[in-house]
């Protein structure tokens, strides 16, 4: 994932909250350095997401049978969940070429042109972070996606003329962590849309076992399950924890490879708790409780207080906390739940402001 987060410090919609010092840098479970090494190459290698994979398989077979390009496809879901994996497996299944780019890399229509002229019949153009395409580029690609035609204006003023260029039909695969940020017209141009959700623990465990084999590391089934339970339903996190557990096992000279106690020791050292929350997740909950009395608090205010980008909070921290029922999103802002208080070792029954509810005294 291209990490170009924009920190919107110019927002005036919320009052400036009190500031707490930024946390020291910590382990980033979204580190994507190892993605390519462990990425499934074909649809058959993709674990979980059964319904999505089944539908994609049907689409691929139909496109191949008719010798026509696949319809444009939008993949959305949280980071590390398999969007790029599917977007690269599909062209392989189709036996076509793929060009890869991303929303932030396409600053102007001229940046898109080389991809369009290079596109072969039926090939795939993968646009990662498609929600970050500038409006001018979005408008430019509407006719491309619809009619495989580009309209280019050359020159300015009276001497300006429009050039129409016919393109070879191809497929756009867009990936986004924020489908809500896509404009209606752009979304409508994707005939196929698939949402990837967090994985079941059993599926993540299967990914861990397969990848341990790829890394020639031995791991017990209980250890794989323990690692999966703490990976927040996210394959990338599972992979990164597996790399860490492998280092830890080597360091401890563990003769039986990665065992459950070893996983527990390794994750304790990374400060990853029973639910798979890391320091950043807990800091988010602690900030909501300690600074905002449990909420409701606006995203910008929480982000300012934590000295972190609101985009990172919204994309990478909140989705799992929401799914686990640790926070709620209300019209007035984010709120912690009784489950979150219990998880932090606080008494949900105690009145707000009481010592049992207070973290920072
Ligand atoms: N269904 C899956 N089966 C097996 N491994 C998977 C699966 N999905 C993802 N992975 C693993 O997780 C890694 C990260 O997945 P991927 O890069 O596809 O995530 P992404 O959704 O594109 O994330 P981002 O939003 O950060 O770009 C892959 O390299 C792969 O090893
Ligand atoms: Mg990706």
Image (spheres, rainbow, N blue to C red):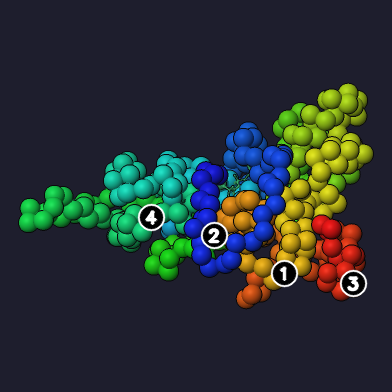
Circle nearer the N terminus (2, 3): 2
- Residue name at image x 62 percent, y 76 percent: 331
The residue carrying mark 1 is 295
> Which-is-in-front pick, marks 4 and 3?
3
Residue at the location (78% across, 61% down)?
Answer: 290
- Who comes first in sequence, dot 1 or dot 3? 1
Distance of label 1 from label 3 (alpha carbons): 15 Å
Q: Is residue 40 left or right of residue 124?
A: right
Residue under label 2, please give it. 178
Mark 4 lies on residue: 134
Q: Are marks 2 and 4 in contact (CB under 8 Å)?
A: no
How far, Cα to Cα, is label 1 from label 4?
34 Å
User: Residue 341, percent across and down?
Assistant: 84, 64
Task: Calculate the distance from the C-alpha at mark 4 to the C-alpha at mark 3.
Answer: 49 Å
Q: Is mark 2 within 8 Å of ligand 1?
A: no
Image coordinates for residue 230, horizontal then vertical, percent: 80, 49
Q: Earlier in the sequence, mark 2 or mark 4?
A: 4
| Element on which disc 1 rests | loop
What residue is shown at x 66% (from left), y 44% (from top)? Answer: 30
Using a 10 Å C-alpha cutoff, classify the residue at mark 4 as few (fewer than 14 neighbours), some (14 to 19) or many (20 or more): some
**Res 327 visible:** no
């Amino acid at each position: 994932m291209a990490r170009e987060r924009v920190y919107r410090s110019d927002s005036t919609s919320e009052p400036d909250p009190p500031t707490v010092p930024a946390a020291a840098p910590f382990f980033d479970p979204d580190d994507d350095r190892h993605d390519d090494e462990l990425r499934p190459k074909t649809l058959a290698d993709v674990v979980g997401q059964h319904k999505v994979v089944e539908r994609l398989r049907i689409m691929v077979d139909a496109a191949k049978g008719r010798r026509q390009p696949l319809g444009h496809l939008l993949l959305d879901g949280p980071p590390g969940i398999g969007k790029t994996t599917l977007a690269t497996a599909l062209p392989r299944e189709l036996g076509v070429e793929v060009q890869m780019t991303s929303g932030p890399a396409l600053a102007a229509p001229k940046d898109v042109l080389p991809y369009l002229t290079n596109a072969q019949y039926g090939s795939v153009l993968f646009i990662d972070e498609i929600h970050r395409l500038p409006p001018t580029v979005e408008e430019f690609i509407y006719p491309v996606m619809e009619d495989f035609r580009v309209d280019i204006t050359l020159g300015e003023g009276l001497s300006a003329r429009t050039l129409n260029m016919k393109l070879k039909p191809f497929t756009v695969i867009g990936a986004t962590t924020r489908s809500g940020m896509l404009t209606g017209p752009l979304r409508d141009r994707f005939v196929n849309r698939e949402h990837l959700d967090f994985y079941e623990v059993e599926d993540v465990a299967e990914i861990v076992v397969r990848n341990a084999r790829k890394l020639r590391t031995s791991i017990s089934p209980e250890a794989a399950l323990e690692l999966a339970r703490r990976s927040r339903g996210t394959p990338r996190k599972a992979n990164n924890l597996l790399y860490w557990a492998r280092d830890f096992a080597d360091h401890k000279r563990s003769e039986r490879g990665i065992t459950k106690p070893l996983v527990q020791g390794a994750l304790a050292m990374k400060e990853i708790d029973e639910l798979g929350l890391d320091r950043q997740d807990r800091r988010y909950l602690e900030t909501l409780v300690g600074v905002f009395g449990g909420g409701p608090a606006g995203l910008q205010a929480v982000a300012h207080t934590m000295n972190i980008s609101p985009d990172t909070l919204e994309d990478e921290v909140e989705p799992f906390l929401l799914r686990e029922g640790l926070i709620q999103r209300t019209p007035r802002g984010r709120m912690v739940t009784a489950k979150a208080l219990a998880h932090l070792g606080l008494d949900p029954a105690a009145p707000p402001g009481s010592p049992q509810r207070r973290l920072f005294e």
